[in-house]
Amino acid sequence: MEELLIEFKNVTKRFGERTVLDNVDLRIRDGQVTTIIGKSGTGKSVLLKHIIGLLSPTEGTILFRGRPIHEMNQNEFDAVRDQFSYCFQNNALFDSLTIFHNIALPLQQTTKMGKKEIEKRVLEKLEQLELDEVSEKYPSELSGGMQKRVALARALVTDPKIVLFDEPTTGQDPIRKNAILRMIAQNQKRFGFTTIMISHDIPDVFFISNRILILYDGKVIFQGNYHELDKLEHPMVDEYIRSLKDFEDEFFGSDLERDRPGFSEKDLKPSEKAGNVTVAIFTLDNLDELLEKLGQRRTDEIVKSLGECVNRHFGDVGISNRVARNQFATVLNYTDTAKAENMLEGFTRELREHGLGGASVDTGGGIDSEKSFCIMVRAGLVERNPGEGFQVTTDKARSRQKEIARFLFCAIP
Amino acid sequence: MTTMRPSGENINQVWPFAHVGTKVTDWVNEFGAVAIFLFKSFFKVFRAKQMSSIVQQVYYVGARSAPVVMLVGLFTGMVLGIQLYHTLVKFGSAGVLGSAIALSLIRELGPVLTAIMITARAGSSMTTEIGIQRISEQIDALYTMRIDSLQYLVTPRIAASIISFPLLTAFFDIIGIIGGYLTGVVLLGLDAGTYFYRVRTSVEMADITGGFVKSVVFAIIVSTICCFQGYFTHMRKDGHGAKSVGLSTTSAVVLSCVLILISDFVVTCFLL
């Protein structure tokens, strides 16, 4: 198990008469992505500011690697802070500096790097976050979403070990939101840094989060992984999480490092009420090849296109959701296998007619392997046995997948 | 021992003392906070990577204030020329006009008026700029990036003020003497040789040094007060957000002007 990085023990924070954090106990582990969720005004940002030392608790203790922060001397605390980076909710960009200089500032002020090295690292981050065209502009000349990306670039340019993100995807379009979550997941995977993030992007954040922490009325009511959260019976879960999770437009997933279901067991209603229940799985194969040859944005569009097609076709009769980075699942209530197979035939026809993300179906006319490549869509159906768990049913559906369409793509040189 | 709770009447009787006591305690606390703020900021002048920020601030505080300071200096000298000429003529001492103008400007008016003009122009902008950075969490962002906000924001401004105030005072004095020449000599017909002879013979090195000492003291007061007001704008109890920045700017300018005049008196007492 990963080492305990940050621990809150009975932390209370009051602003005058108002108690924002009430006896909070929490544990954050090294090398994990921890997501804090909760309604607006429940003290999420206050909690994050306690971690980096911008606020001090009224009562209680905060420990960093087992040592109370308030017992550290200035040098020790500075050494702790050196490992952190923080991305503010309102960006906190320096409005009198250009975008380039905003991102370069921490490197210029806190490192001994040369001008060329700083320029190289800043340009790399600008490119990664699609900001290279606005590097000479000022923050006030950019949209809210772009400002957020500048703040992200500034937070990541120093290659920190622990990054705190306060709503990093707010104001982003779905594709960029996806890209930001993916960047967080990829960096976490590549460099093993610890991420503590506040987000409302449910269920997408579940795909990249190792641990989830729910703040409700100033108290931590849950900390654990997604599967544990799914079993949690609390008004907060019903009114907030599930309402968002069922939002069908949320088709744009993220770079899933782990295969996590986007459904709860409750979505599979008892068969007495829902009749026969069939689960369909749709998989876009060769995703890595797509990423390599077409780039991230184009890949997102293609995955999104498949999701939209699933949603369009099955939206009236079932609930669909993304369950892996290249996989969608649809739960069809009152549907037996024969009926579901008819629906799948209709879906296949529609998919072949509409194409996938602008690509036409491969007619088998031969391809130039250097310029073109094929991507396959597979689908599998299974009728759920009464009392069977969702995971078991989806695994069965996965094992029965077969090719339903093949699309031809041209590689970007 | 029993503790007596004051009745309503007792509270009314002690109220003025309690109020004055609270105010005095607040002032002492504020003064202490400003002193610590200055101390912590000033000694960061000698840290690395400060030179370019200081040069940049010298440009904003000094170079960009020069036109307005020189304009005020010119008209102050011209007014002094007219007023003093008509006063001195009554005593048959018009010949000492050059001495009167030069000493008034170098010892007193130059440092004070220059400091007030820079307070209005650059001091207010220091408060506003730092205040906005405070309320928009930019100063918090510096903290999270491990950048010392005092060193980054305050120290260059204090250093630039210490460099700029004496230089601008010198400009003010020279232009003021030229202004006195324009009215006293060109307009009212006093002999040019007499005017400049009196200027040269009456002004001693101690006068010039005293003027510069005052301008350095004013520089420290103005830059510290203005930066302090901006830096702690979020702590104001009488306003929040943009309003608190406005109130801080007003406080900074008023307090700086008042302290310039008070410290002028104190420094003059020590110098003479």
Image: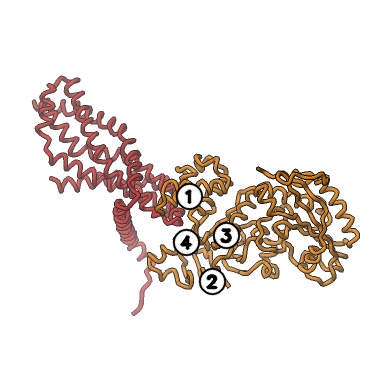
Q: Can you tell which quarter of the image residue A22 is in?
A: bottom right
Residue A105 at x, y percent in the picture: 44, 49
The amino acid marked with disc number 4 is Gln
Q: Which residue is mark 3?
A: A190
Task: Looking at the picture, tell me which residue is in the foreground, B188 or A84.
Answer: A84
Q: Kindly report the distance in space between the C-alpha atoms of the residues bearing marks 4 and 1.
A: 24 Å
Q: Kindly report the distance in space between the C-alpha atoms of the residues bearing marks 1 and 3.
A: 33 Å
Q: Residues within 10 Å of mark 4 (few under 14, many from 20)?
A: some
Q: Earlier in the sequence, mark 2 or mark 4?
A: 2
The amino acid marked with disc number 2 is Glu
Q: Is residue A221 left or right of residue B244?
A: right
Q: Which residue is mark 1?
A: B136
Classify mark 1: helix, strand or loop: loop
Q: Is residue A42 left or right of residue A228?
A: left
- The circle on residue A3 is 2
Q: Kindly report the distance in space between the C-alpha atoms of the residues bearing marks 3 and 2.
A: 18 Å
Chain under disc 4:
A
Q: Kindly report the distance in space between the C-alpha atoms of the residues bearing marks 4 and 3.
A: 17 Å
Q: Kindly report the distance in space between the C-alpha atoms of the residues bearing marks 2 and 1.
A: 35 Å
The answer to whether residue B23 is seen in the rendering is no
Q: Which residue is mark 4?
A: A83
- The circle on residue B89 is none
